[in-house]
């Protein structure tokens, strides 16, 4: 029987009728997915990823090690951040769908270079970091509903002559290998003959160390991640984020392609956070309040592109 066809009893006392109505409502909810934001129950057996998670009792989560304030280690080597908080809600949804309440969570550190391959080969079931949803990447992996939008800019030392991308001609710039920023820098060299000496690092921590060493003039990356990187400096106030955004990045979680059931659970959990308004509380926690390790407040108001993404949740790539 469909949830909408639950019969309401006509007889009985008012108390009995109220109890019956409550039972009918509960039955209707049981027939729906236990994941917020989804309309139908997920066929766990038909989902390769959910089936694997249920049979093994383990879910493997890809995370970053220094992507403040999204996914990084705290003083006790525990993964924390905005992305991880959202990921925890997805894990809860997976527990409900699979019925594995004692689900073991295996945390797997990933980098810009290996994150896609680790999702593809099954080492990671869900990558909960700071990956941009790109149409080119959709040929290799699937993406969840967008949970953040960032712009690509530059981190420089205060007083630097570099104020925008036009000032980079003939200078050395560092970025993370395998990122959109690396691709943009190469395009500037190809199309505008900018003659930028590009250095590629494995992660945000290494890129910022290279910048602090004086070997490069600027560090190009998503603006919010640059703001996070500067919090690692002995004196964060010595570093500023500058430049006109060269692209806008839609952050989403990565999962394997062609697994509609697992994607439904992931999207449902994220969409549920957005529609309930809980995402705003998480945003305030990580972008409008002091965060570890140095209790720096990003004081980052929600951007218009992000407000738009939350007003109409979707998994569309910007490019």
Image (tube, helix red, strand yellow):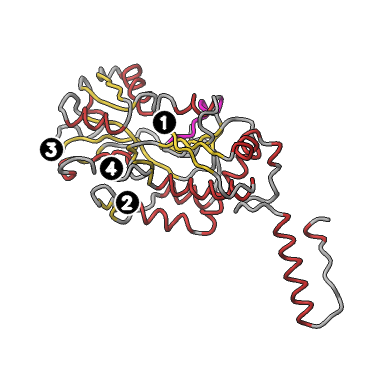
Over which residues does the magenta segment extend?
131-139
Question: How busy is the neighbourhood of tag 2: few (under 14 within 10 Å), some, or many (20 plus)?
Answer: some
Helix, strand or loop at mark 1: loop
Which one is earlier in the sequence, the residue at label 1 or at label 4? 1
Tell me where residue 32 appears, x and y as whole percent.
70, 54
Residue tagged by mark 3?
Answer: 159
Drawn side of residue 192 relative to residue 269, left or right = left
The front one of 50 and 222 is 50
Front tag of 1 and 2: 1
- Work out how far the residue at label 2 is from the one at label 3, CA to CA, in angstroms: 22 Å
Instruction: Give the residue furthest to the left.
Output: 159
Q: Which mark is residue 227?
A: 4
Which one is earlier in the sequence, the residue at label 4 or at label 2? 4
Tell me where residue 274 appears, x and y as whole percent.
51, 53
- Work out how far the residue at label 1 is from the one at label 2, CA to CA, in angstroms: 26 Å
- Work out how far the residue at label 3 is from the one at label 4, CA to CA, in angstroms: 17 Å
- Work out how far the residue at label 4 is from the one at label 2, CA to CA, in angstroms: 10 Å
Tell me where residue 229 appears, x and y as whole percent.
27, 39
Q: Are marks 4 and 2 in contact (CB under 8 Å)?
A: yes
Helix, strand or loop at mark 3: loop
Residue tagged by mark 1?
Answer: 110
Residue tagged by mark 2?
Answer: 300
Q: Please report the residue visible at 34 percent of the width from the left and 39 percent of the height from the top.
A: 67
Does 21 lie within the magenta span?
Answer: no
Which one is earlier in the sequence, the residue at label 3 or at label 4? 3
């Amino acid at each position: 029987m469909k949830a909408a066809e639950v019969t309401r009893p006509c007889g009985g006392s008012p108390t009995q009728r109220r109890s019956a109505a409550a039972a009918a409502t509960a039955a209707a909810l049981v027939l729906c997915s236990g994941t917020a934001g989804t309309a139908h129950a997920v066929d766990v057996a038909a989902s390769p990823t959910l089936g694997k998670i249920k049979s093994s009792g383990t879910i493997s989560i890809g995370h970053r090690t220094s992507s403040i304030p999204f996914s990084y280690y705290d003083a006790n080597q525990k993964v924390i951040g905005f992305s991880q908080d959202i990921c925890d809600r997805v894990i809860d949804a997976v527990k409900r769908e699979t019925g594995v309440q004692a689900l073991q969570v295996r945390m797997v550190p990933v980098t810009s270079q290996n994150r896609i391959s680790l999702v593809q080969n099954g080492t990671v079931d869900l990558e909960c970091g700071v990956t941009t949803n790109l149409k080119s990447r959709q040929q290799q992996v699937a993406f969840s509903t967008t949970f953040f939008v960032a712009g690509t800019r530059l981190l420089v030392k205060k007083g630097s002559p570099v104020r925008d991308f036009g000032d980079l001609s003939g200078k050395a710039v560092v970025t993370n290998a395998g990122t959109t920023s690396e691709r943009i820098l190469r395009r500037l060299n190809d199309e505008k003959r900018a003659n930028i000496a590009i250095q590629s690092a494995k992660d945000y921590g290494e890129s910022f160390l290279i910048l602090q060493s004086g070997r490069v003039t600027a560090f190009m990356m998503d603006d919010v991640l640059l703001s996070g990187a500067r919090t690692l400096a002995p004196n964060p106030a010595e570093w500023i984020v500058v430049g006109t955004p060269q692209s806008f990045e839609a952050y989403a979680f990565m999962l394997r392609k062609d697994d509609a059931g697992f994607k439904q659970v992931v999207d449902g959990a994220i969409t549920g956070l957005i529609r309930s308004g809980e995402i705003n509380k998480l945003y305030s926690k990580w972008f409008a309040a002091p965060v570890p390790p140095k209790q720096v407040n990003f004081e980052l108001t929600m951007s218009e592109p992000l407000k738009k993404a939350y007003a109409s949740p979707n998994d569309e790539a910007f490019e």
